[in-house]
Image (cartoon, rainbow, N blue to C red):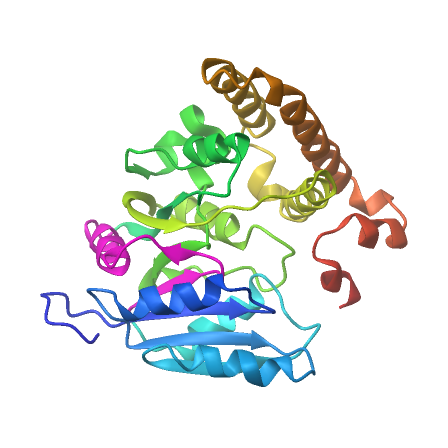
Amino acid sequence: MKMGAVMADRIDVVIPVYRPDEKLEQLIERLNMQSVKPDHVWFLQTMTGTGEDEAVRKILERADGAQVAAVEKGSYDHGGTRNRGAMLSKADSILFMTQDAVPADNLLIETLHRRLMSDSRIAAAYARQIPDDRAGEIERYTRLFNYPEVSSVKDESDLGRLGIKTYFCSNVCAMYRREAYEKLGGFAARTIFNEDMIFASKAVRAGYKIAYAADAEVIHAHKYSYWQQLTRNFDLGVSQRQYREVFENVKSESEGMRLVKDTAKYLMKQGKWYLIPDLVIQSGCKLIGYKLGLKYEKLPKGIVKKLSMNKQYWGK
């Protein structure tokens, strides 16, 4: 770890990359400015087979400590590809990020690492996601709902109170203790979605804790169309069906209803009542997609692929 601070752990960053936009360059710029610099930044670049690949690689090489590993098109997997990055790394702590998560300041790595190391039973610590200026009011409140201003630590004793939120962890920006990661077998090697929550569930059941670091922030938000909301939540339902032993015995849908109600109240309070129809349509698309995903095994394969956001998953 290239720094003058007191921490002795080696830290690596792992980032899957596929057809990035300008946020990747912003991410790299902010990583290079961190108070605690990683030993390596492992980029897992899914190849397109076009001239775009070389242009992207040149951008990746701007990162201090950059290491680029090619991923064959069609072989990307949410869990398996990240496991490959962890195997390439020899660091004690591994920070997984997505290509569109931009550190809000130069203290992200330092803050996450401090939270991870604050308790030997913490297996992972994830960052707060804040929206950019382009995010709408609904997305802005959703981020606040899922990533509040107050840090927390969750363990098995919270299941009755928090339900599925106990397992909430996001690889948009989350740091893992290698010792716990290896002991628990890493991420599910074949999953369409939710590799972070599936790991968190294993960690919690094994007696570990999951930490949320509200003071470690990344700028990250999406503006999905109604159809994209449906397909994303279809994949969510698929993952929960495939790993039903993880999700069936914890409260899930009630949390979604609470989000809708709280968002509606927020919009009314902000005088943005005219956005409520949009909220209703978005929520309906999410629910329909999720319910269809839970039943994906009963649907024709062609329909399943059409309904999925991660279409390449179904070609494996």
- Confirm whether residue 178 shows in the render: no
Q: Quadrant of the C terminus?
A: bottom right
**Is 136 drawn above or below residue 63 in the view shown?**
above
Q: Quadrant of the N terminus?
A: bottom left
> Measured from the top left, where is residue 34 in percent x and y?
25, 65
**Is 32 drawn above or below residue 102 in the view shown?**
below
Q: Which residue is at 79% across, 47% downward? A: 307
Q: Which residue is at 41% across, 33% downward? A: 144
Quadrant for residue 42, please give it.
bottom left
Q: Which residue is at 27% across, 50% downward? A: 121
Task: Reply yes or no: does residue 94 show up in magenta.
Answer: yes
Task: Reply yes or no: does residue 154 show up in magenta.
Answer: no
**Is 94 drawn above or below residue 172 in the view shown?**
below
The magenta region covers: 92-120
- Confirm whether residue 293 shows in the render: yes
With 13 as the anchor, is 316 left or right in this view? right
